[in-house]
Amino acid sequence: MRRMMVITAHPDDEAGGFGGSLRLYHDRGVETCVVCLTPGQAASNRGGAKSDDELSAMRRKEFAASCEILKVSRGVVLNYPDGKLYRQDLYHVVCDLTYHVRQFRPQVMLTFGAEGGITGHTDHSLASVFGTLAFQWAGRNNRYPDQLKDGVQPYRPQKLYFQTANLALPDRPPITSPAPTTSISIGDYLQTKIDAFKAHTSQSPLFPRVEENLRRLGPQEWFHLAASTKFEPPVLETDLFAGIADEA
């Protein structure tokens, strides 16, 4: 079984940043997993929630609904504080993510680049840092050795990608996006991606603008190959699993 893991910061990131590829690869028979670091409790759009806890519960349900549309095999929302990932203990967060990598055993991992995606969100940047370290450390038996019990073993994913795009948001500080190495044609899954984002009903004030930007990006998702177990010059890919060795 081929497996792909996406590491995000907030509920709705899975749809807006990675939704087309998640659904496309599910339909190609790939098992998919999304690990979201926060329940999005600091969102400006509150959906009528009267407290952070109420909003967290609401957004977890919306995340589950979005994952259902995208046919995500396993969706996990951790409980780190939205908007404050930069204040978290790096070693502890990477420990959590490393455990999920070792359990799920993805050949391919996707996350944001260090710039924080097209929004430049600080939480997205930290998701990149944490996710990159989990990718690098999950296969080392001297990282979090206390996890190595009950069948959990070191596991080395084969490829790490950063999401990238050629779209700049005019009201945001400038970002410098990773160079694209991989172009994924998502075709009609563009609409699926938009529908999944709209499952996050608490964020409905954002729907017109998000849909406009997703349609501007078009039926294409772009990624930057950040690390690979095959050390060779990059070529423009059209398949996230290009060169992946099948496992027994």
Image (tube, grey):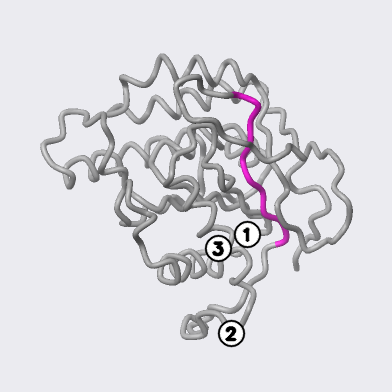
Q: What mark, if any, has residue 106 been given in the picture? A: 1
Task: Give the amino acid at mark 3.
Answer: Phe
Q: Report the quarter where the C terminus lies.
A: bottom right
Please identify the dominant SS of the magenta region: strand
Q: Residue at x 73, y 38 (%)?
A: 179
Q: Earlier in the sequence, mark 2 or mark 1?
A: 1
Give the structural element (helix, strand or loop) at label 2: loop
Q: Earlier in the sequence, mark 2 or mark 3?
A: 3
Instruction: Locate residue 47 relative to residue 15 in the image: left or right.
Output: left
219 or 228, which is in the foreground?
228
124 or 23, which is in the foreground?
124
Local crowd size for mark 1, using a 10 Å CA cut-off: few (<14), some (14–19), many (≥20): many
**Residue, disc 3:** 104
**Residue, disc 2:** 142
Local crowd size for mark 3, using a 10 Å CA cut-off: few (<14), some (14–19), many (≥20): some
The answer to whether the residues at label 1 and label 3 have Cβ atoms under 8 Å apart is yes
The region drawn magenta spans 158-167
Residue 207 image-quadrant placement? top left
Give the structural element (helix, strand or loop) at label 3: helix
46 or 84, which is in the foreground?
84
- Position in image of residue 69 (x %, y %): 47, 33
Q: CA distance from mark 2 to mark 1?
A: 20 Å
The answer to whether residue 162 is magenta is yes
Task: Give the amino acid at mark 1.
Answer: Pro
- Position in image of residue 174 (x %, y %): 54, 30
Give the structural element (helix, strand or loop) at label 1: loop
The answer to whether the residues at label 2 and label 1 have Cβ atoms under 8 Å apart is no
Q: Residue at x 55, y 63 (%)?
A: 104
